[in-house]
Image (spheres, grey):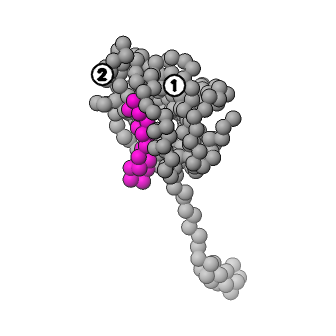
């Protein structure tokens, strides 16, 4: 199985085991950890998570084209955008919102599994998308899984370190947004060594 955690490794794999593992992880989250399921909004709300599942979109949208997957630095975070449009008989068509999707964030494995429904057609250049992630400071890999079913498609992002993510969708044009930021570690304030020494000396003199 390919290693999603290897830095600077951009992958395009036909590994069926990875696909089944990704889909199984999604179903397990949904089945036994309902408290970790978050419904996405139509605007940014600063609702970042390190572990759990985002769900969103419209199940009625059943003909969609994924035009591009792009990444850019946006302040202190990195933004990943999925550009979408509708399709009727192979021709572009307007849609009001994105199709149903799930974004499973797995802190322990350091990865995000993104699955798009709506019978998606892939209309981007994989090599161009992969090149766009090579300079990422937060994402170590992107793995585009083979499209085995007409109803859905999955890709996987690997993180370099501990990250948190927010997912939301925008309209006109329709986009799914993943904002990734580095998780800041809480600093523990320690008392100065000389203060502790002074306290100990005072306690010794008073006998307390």
Instruction: Tell me the distance, in whole angstroms, between the alpha carbons under discs 1 and 2.
Output: 21 Å
Q: Which mark is residue 153?
A: 1
Q: Residue at x 41, y 50 (%)?
A: 73
Q: Secondary structure at mark 2?
A: loop
User: Measured along the vertical axis of the image, is residue 179 above or below residue 60?
Assistant: below
The percent coordinates of residue 183 (x first, y second) are 52, 52
State which quadrant residue 13 falls in: top right
Answer yes or no: is residue 88 visible.
yes
Q: Secondary structure at mark 1?
A: strand
Q: Residue at x 49, y 34 (%)?
A: 126
Q: Residue at x 43, y 43 (%)?
A: 71
Please tell me which residue lies in front, 10 or 182. Answer: 10
Q: Which mark is residue 17?
A: none
Instruction: Specify the farthest residue to the bottom.
Output: 205
Where does the N terminus fall, quadrant-wise? Answer: top right
The percent coordinates of residue 8 (x first, y second) are 57, 48
Q: Which residue is mark 2?
A: 94
Answer yes or no: is residue 51 visible.
no
The percent coordinates of residue 96 (x first, y second) are 31, 23
Dots 1, 2 in contact, CB < 8 A:
no
State which quadrant residue 189 falls in: bottom right
Q: Residue at x 62, y 41 (%)?
A: 4
The percent coordinates of residue 150 (x first, y second) are 51, 17
Magenta region includes residue 80: yes
Q: Is residue 149 left or right of residue 206?
A: left
- Classified by dominant secondary structure, the portion drawn in magenta counts as strand
| Extent of the magenta region | 67-83
Number of residues whose C-alpha sits closer than 10 Å to that of mark 1, classed few (under 14), some (14–19) or many (20 or more): many
């Amino acid at each position: 199985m390919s290693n999603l955690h290897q830095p600077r490794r951009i992958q395009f794999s036909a590994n069926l085991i990875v696909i089944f593992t990704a889909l199984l992880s999604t179903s397990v989250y949904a089945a036994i950890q309902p408290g970790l399921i978050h419904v996405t909004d139509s605007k940014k709300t600063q609702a970042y998570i390190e572990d759990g599942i985002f769900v969103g979109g419209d199940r009625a949208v059943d003909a969609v084209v994924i035009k591009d997957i792009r990444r850019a630095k946006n302040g202190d975070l990195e933004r990943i955008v999925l550009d979408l449009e509708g399709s009727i008989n192979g021709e572009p068509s307007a849609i009001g919102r994105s199709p149903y999707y799930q974004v499973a964030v797995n802190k322990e494995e350091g990865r995000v599994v993104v699955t798009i429904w709506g019978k998606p057609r892939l209309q981007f250049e994989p090599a161009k998308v992969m090149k766009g992630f090579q300079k990422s400071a937060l994402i170590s890999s992107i793995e585009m899984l083979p499209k085995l079913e007409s109803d859905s498609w999955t890709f996987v992002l690997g993180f370099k370190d501990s990250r948190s993510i927010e997912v939301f969708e925008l309209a006109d044009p329709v986009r799914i947004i993943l904002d990734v930021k580095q998780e800041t570690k809480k600093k523990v304030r320690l008392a100065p060594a000389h203060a502790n020494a002074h306290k100990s000396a005072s306690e010794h003199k008073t006998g307390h």
